[in-house]
């Protein structure tokens, strides 16, 4: 079972995934992206948190970064993607739900990240819950168009309803299915 959440920035994709990851705890592995706010409350970057494989929270992108890899106003740290994000995804066990927050420009700046996601989708068999950015891109457009995925479009008005629907699917996959 593969579930993708897509929607505009601020729609609640990460909130939905975070609540479900916390609920299912040890049955979950992967990554969650976090906003980093500056002293004035404005967004200055993003961190990545690993879950289910030993906790780490490391910078992914910052406004102040001198990285040559730019996504909007943020400089992306390619080492974070290759040394934290990709290994956390690859360590997911078959009995875990793999959470990937998010499949978007910052993460896709790494060809290794894209290859890992492509490989997971081709191999199949691993339950995946991932957020996917809403901008049109050949890589993510192809993921969202796959016939073997469930796609939920999230917005601030429906995010609780979407969370409940996904929770029901996850419960039947992770908890009620015979092992």
Image: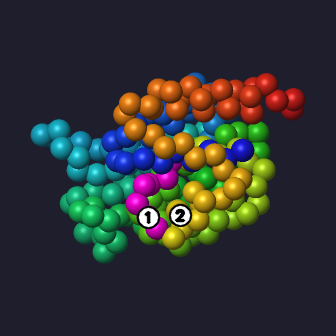
Is disc 1 surrounded by few (<14), some (14 to 19) or many (20+) residues within 10 Å? few
The correct choice, above or below, for 171 with respect to 90 in the image is: above
Q: In which image quadrant can residue 171 be found? A: top right
Which residue does the numbered mark 2 point to in the structure image? 141
Mark 1 and mark 2 in contact? Answer it, CB < 8 Å.
yes
Crowd band around label 2 with a 10 angstrom C-alpha radius: few (<14), some (14–19), many (20+): some
Quadrant in the picture for the N terminus: top right
Give the CA separation, mark 1 to mark 2. 6 Å
Q: Using the image, tell me which numbered label, if any, was put on residue 176.
A: none
Whether residue 93 is visible to the viewer of this picture, yes or no, is no
Residue 157 position within the rendered picture, expressed as x and y whole percent measured from the top left: 38, 30
- Picture coordinates of residue 49, whole percent (x, y): 46, 44
- Name above or below for residue 84 compared with residue 165: below
Q: Secondary structure at mark 1?
A: loop
Identified at 73% across, 63% down, the residue is: 122
Per the image, the residue denoted by label 1 is 136
Q: Which residue is at the far left?
A: 40
Q: Give the residue at x 40% y 60%.
A: 135
Query: In the picture, which quadrant includes the C terminus?
Result: top right
Task: Please tell me in which quadrant of the rendered image residue 69 appears.
Answer: bottom left
The image shows residue 94, relative to residue 27, as above or below, that is: below
Residue nearer the viewer, 151 or 103? 151
Q: Residue furthest right?
A: 178
Q: Position of residue 37 (x, y in %)?
A: 24, 42
Kindly report the secondary structure that dominates the magenta region of the rendered protein. loop
Tell me where the magenta segment starts and ends, as one range: 131-137
């Amino acid at each position: 079972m593969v579930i993708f959440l897509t929607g505009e920035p601020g729609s609640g994709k990460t909130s939905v995934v975070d609540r479900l990851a916390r609920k299912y705890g040890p049955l979950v592995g992967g990554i969650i992206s976090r906003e980093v706010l500056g002293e004035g409350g404005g967004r200055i970057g993003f961190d990545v948190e690993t879950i289910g494989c030993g906790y780490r929270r490391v910078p992914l992108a910052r406004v102040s970064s001198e990285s040559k890899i730019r996504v909007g106003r943020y400089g992306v740290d390619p080492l974070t993607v290759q040394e934290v994000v990709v290994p956390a995804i690859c360590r997911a066990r078959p009995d875990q739900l793999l959470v990937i927050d998010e499949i978007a420009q910052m993460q896709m700046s790494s060809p290794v990240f894209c290859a890992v996601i492509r490989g997971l989708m081709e191999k199949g068999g691993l339950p995946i819950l991932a957020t996917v950015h809403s901008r049109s891109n050949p890589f993510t457009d192809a993921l969202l168009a796959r016939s073997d995925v469930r796609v939920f479009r999230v917005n601030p008005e429906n995010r609780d309803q979407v969370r409940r629907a996904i929770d029901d699917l996850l419960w039947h996959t992770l908890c009620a299915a015979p092992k």
